[in-house]
């Protein structure tokens, strides 16, 4: 009896932590559960083995004023392609990533029920993004709020002129953290540290291991406990008649 109970409990806790490692947030376009998506478009294709976005969302992520959020990258003149590629990648990461569990928070917004907060970005992803936007212009530091939406897409409010990117975002850290109201946290970590999330990657998704690290102690300790309990159960069942 005991061993069956213990086994069930440990299995249940294992399933719970697996859920956190591989899940989709309750956002505007996210799938309910992650899974393979063979047809993901261009920059979103690294997620095709396991994604929270579908093919339509991945294609729209590459469009200006897309139906995803009607967001207008060109609010202070046409955004340069080298800058825009980072916003496309950021959109793919946001829509497709199944490993954001540790940073998902409930939020009371009319367009989504959950958001991400303080996702630790690898230094290089943040710096490359900021560097590639040096020739661009914007009027606002926080792109989540304060726009004039009267035409259906965001435009600069009347009293906020366009300024050089680096005047609005003096450092890469300011940009990465402020632009989406602290969805990201700046780090000085390298992509090989296993402790920061990568917007850009090829091959197997390196962010799963990172999520696992941050679910610590929830996952690592639990799996250690699970192993111990399993061992105990097995040895008990061998001793008992
Ligand atoms: C993708 O878009 C097409 C055409 O608009 C539509 O027919 C289809 O249902 C969409 N698929 C999903 C999964 O949303
Ligand atoms: C938004 O834009 C419309 C149309 O240009 C303008 O009439 C309105 O005053 C603007 N609102 C703000 C808050 O800037
Ligand atoms: C880290 O970045 C380097 C240089 O861009 C790349 O060659 C390497 O594959 C990356 N490592 C991981 C784990 O993604």
Image (cartoon, rainbow, N blue to C red):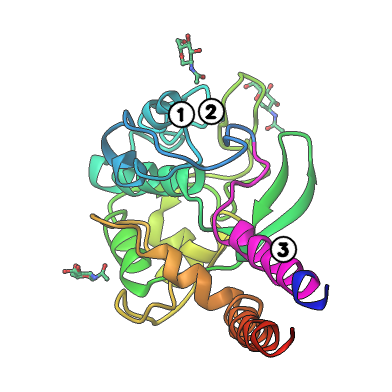
Mark 2 or 1, closer to the camera: 1
Q: Is residue 150 visible?
A: yes
Q: Residue at left 52%, top 72%?
A: 212
Q: Main secondary structure of the magenta part?
A: helix
Mark with earlier residue (2, 1): 1
> What is the number of the mark on residue 158?
none
Q: Residue 12 occupies which quadrant of the picture?
A: bottom right
Mark 1 or 3, closer to the camera: 3
* Residue density around tag 3, few if under 14, some if 14–19, many if 20 or more, within 10 Å: few
> What is the number of the mark on residue 12?
3
Q: Secondary structure at mark 3?
A: helix
* Image quarter in which the N terminus is found: bottom right
Q: Is residue 176 left or right of residue 147?
A: left
* Residue density around tag 1, few if under 14, some if 14–19, many if 20 or more, within 10 Å: many
Percent coordinates x, y for residue 233 in the rendering: 68, 82
Q: CA distance from mark 3 to mark 2?
A: 36 Å
Residue annotated with mark 2: 68
Extreme-front residue of the structure: 241
Q: CA distance from mark 1 to mark 3?
A: 33 Å
> Ligand 1: does it lie within 8 Å of the C-beta at label 1?
yes
Mark 3 or 2, closer to the camera: 3
- Which portion, as a residue range, is magenta? 5-27
Circles 2 and 1, Cβ within 8 Å, touching? The answer is yes
Can you say whether 58 is above or below 185 in the image? above
Can you say whether 225 is above or below 83 in the image? below
Percent coordinates x, y for residue 92 in the rendering: 41, 43
Q: Secondary structure at mark 1?
A: helix
Residue annotated with mark 1: 57
């Amino acid at each position: 009896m005991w061993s069956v109970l213990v086994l069930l409990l440990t299995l249940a806790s294992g399933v719970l932590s697996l859920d956190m490692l591989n899940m989709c947030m309750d956002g505007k376009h996210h799938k309910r559960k992650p899974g393979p998506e063979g047809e993901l478009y261009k920059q979103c294709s690294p997620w095709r083995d396991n994604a929270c976005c579908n093919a339509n969302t991945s294609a729209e992520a590459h469009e200006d004023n897309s139906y995803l959020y009607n967001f207008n990258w060109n609010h202070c003149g046409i955004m340069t392609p080298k800058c825009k590629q980072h916003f496309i990648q950021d959109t793919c990461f946001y829509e497709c990533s199944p490993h954001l569990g540790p940073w998902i928070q409930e939020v009371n917004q009319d367009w989504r029920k959950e958001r991400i907060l303080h996702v630790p970005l690898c230094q290089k992803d943040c710096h490359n993004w900021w560097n590639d936007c040096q020739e661009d212009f914007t009027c606002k530091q926080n792109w989540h709020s304060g726009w004039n939406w009267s035409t259906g897409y965001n435009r600069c409010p009347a009293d906020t002129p366009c300024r050089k990117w680096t005047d609005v975002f003096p450092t890469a850290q300011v940009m990465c953290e402020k632009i989406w109201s602290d969805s990201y946290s700046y780090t000085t970590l390298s992509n090989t540290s296993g402790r920061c999330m990568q917007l850009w990657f090829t091959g197997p998704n390196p962010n799963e291991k990172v999520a696992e690290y941050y679910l610590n102690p929830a996952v690592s300790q639990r799996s250690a406990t699970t192993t111990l309990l399993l061992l105990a159960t097995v040895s008990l069942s061998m001793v008992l008649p």
